[in-house]
């Protein structure tokens, strides 16, 4: 996993400060099932994304268009939520790509709410002469997080360091939780006949 680090104040709202953060990660899932079964499982985009730790919701708002809402607190009792609008591109049996889009429906959530950009890709490979499968799952995330009022007096370097450490921790927590969730859920799903 690598983390991109930036801090900026956008020109359109010079009085409002943002911390720009991002990260990428790749994980390979191995399933005791053929590619067709693994692919079918990952086609249920809302069910898969709801396994992310801190996922508040994931739902379709148009054909192959999804909204993922990921929530957190800032450690001081303030709720925050990132909104990711995505479009799924399917290559049956080979790949599922989630691409960021704009223009999703309006949202009404409490707390600090901000849009983010997320790309994800699942590449499916047969293993063991087709009896098992490997799924290489990669995620790339970028966020512009508004600095809450009580933190605006902090120096930029302190905010940047705090943001970087928090992003590294959250990415690690999300990858670990997502990996455990997918593995357990996939086996349960296969056991019930999908």
Image (cartoon, rainbow, N blue to C red):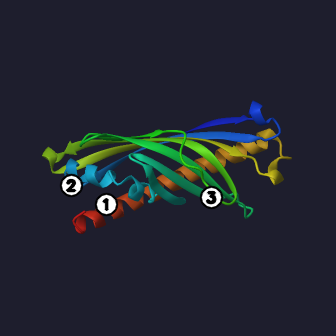
| Labels 1 and 3: the sequence-earlier one | 3
Give the SS element for disc 2.
loop
Mark drawn on residue 65: none
Q: Could you give the CA–CA distance between mark 1 and mark 3, rounded to whole angstroms?
A: 26 Å
Mark drawn on residue 186: 1
Q: Position of residue 95 (x, y in %)?
A: 31, 40
Instruction: Kindly identify the residue that appears in the image at 79 percent across and 41 percent down.
Output: 16
What is the quadrant of the C terminus in the image?
Answer: bottom left
Task: Give the residue at mark 2.
Answer: 33
| Labels 2 and 1: the sequence-earlier one | 2
Contact check, label 3 and label 2, Cβ < 8 Å: no
Which label lies toward us, 3 or 2?
3
User: How busy is the neighbourhood of tag 2: few (under 14 within 10 Å), some, or many (20 plus)?
Assistant: some
Contact check, label 2 and label 1, Cβ < 8 Å: yes
Q: Could you give the CA–CA distance between mark 2 and mark 1, rounded to whole angstroms?
A: 10 Å
Q: Position of residue 193 (x, y in %)?
A: 21, 65
């Amino acid at each position: 996993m690598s983390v991109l680090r930036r801090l900026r104040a956008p020109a359109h709202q010079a009085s409002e400060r943002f911390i720009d953060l991002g990260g990428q990660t790749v994980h390979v899932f191995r399933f005791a099932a053929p590619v067709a079964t693994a692919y079918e499982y990952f086609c249920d985009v809302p069910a898969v994304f709801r396994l992310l730790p801190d996922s508040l919701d994931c739902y379709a708002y148009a054909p192959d268009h999804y909204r993922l809402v990921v929530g957190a607190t800032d450690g001081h009792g303030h709720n925050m939520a990132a909104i990711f609008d995505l479009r799924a591109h399917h290559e049956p049996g080979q790949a599922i790509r989630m691409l960021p889009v704009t223009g999703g429906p309006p949202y009404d959530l409490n707390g600090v709410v901000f849009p983010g950009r997320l790309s994800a890709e699942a590449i499916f490979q047969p293993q063991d002469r087709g009896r098992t499968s490997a799924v290489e799952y990669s995620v790339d995330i970028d966020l512009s997080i508004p600095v809450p009022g009580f933190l605006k007096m902090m120096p930029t370097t302190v905010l940047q360091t705090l943001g970087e450490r928090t992003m590294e921790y959250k990415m690690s927590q999300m990858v670990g939780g997502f990996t455990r969730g997918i593995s357990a859920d996939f086996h349960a799903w296969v056991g019930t006949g999908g």
